Amino acid sequence: MKLLRTLLAPALLLALALPAAAQKVSLSNLSNYLNKFTTATGEFTQINSDGTISTGQIYIHRPGRIRFEYNKPDSSLVMAGGGQVAVFDSKSNTGPEQYPLRRTPLSIILAEKVDFNRSGMITGHKSDGKTTTVRAQDPEHPEYGHIELVFTSSPVELRQWVITDNAGSQTTVVLGELKKGGNMRPSLFNIPQETQRRGN
């Protein structure tokens, strides 16, 4: 018994010396984090529903604007602006596929005011001790799909999201370090201008 106590004592002291596992970040703090920044840019890695992987640069301009610029040789582009999402497929010359931003789960984090405490928006909120994950949907239109957002806890930073669309397809975006602040030229989110530039 004495030997057991001797063996356990250092482990106990070590456990007491280590910081406790990060607490689950509250929904209010996560909402505040998103509401505090207007612009951000960084690198991303995208894992598509078919298992293929893409990389590129992301530009966020809240509210309502985002741009995924894929690395060469892929000249595809996804952008949101003017209430629309446009997908420019590098293999297509018929113009972008477009649909309303409000019909996609991305609209949740691009809203002018993010409020995760809104009734019916959050359907999951958990922590693994290092990150906090929330699952969010449009409470009025859950049929539009949902988004799972992964945040680090200290400091709070958005690191990943998984979008599940209305057909059940999943797209994962893993973010590098986001650089917040700074001006962005409006053309980054101008769908008609990009369409014209590409000659579609």
Image: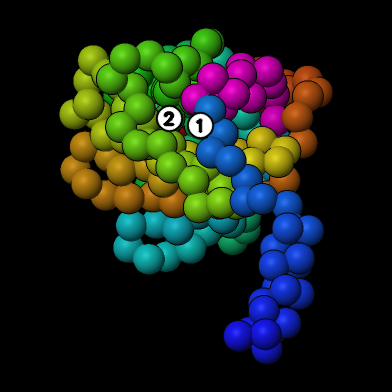
Disc 2 marks a residue whose amino acid type is Leu
| Element type at mark 1 | strand
Q: Residues within 10 Å of mark 2 (few under 14, many from 20)?
A: many
Q: Residue 106 carries which label?
A: 2
The part of the chain drawn in magenta is 27-40
Left or right of residue 107, residue 68 in this image: right
Along the viewing direction, whichever of 127 and 104 lies nearer the viewer: 127
Is residue 118 something that shows in the picture? yes
Give the farthest residue toward the bottom. Answer: 3
- Return the residue at label 1: 79
Can you give x and y, in whole percent of width and height, for residue 105 in the image? 36, 30
Asked if the residue at tag 1 contacts the one at tag 2, i.e. Cβ–Cβ closer than 8 Å, the answer is no
Tally the marks.
2
On screen, residue 146 above or below 62: below
Mark 1, other Cα within 10 Å: few <14 / some 14–19 / many ≥20: many
Residue 50 part of the magenta-drawn span: no
Residue at image position (67%, 85%) is 2
Percent x, y of residue 159: 60, 45
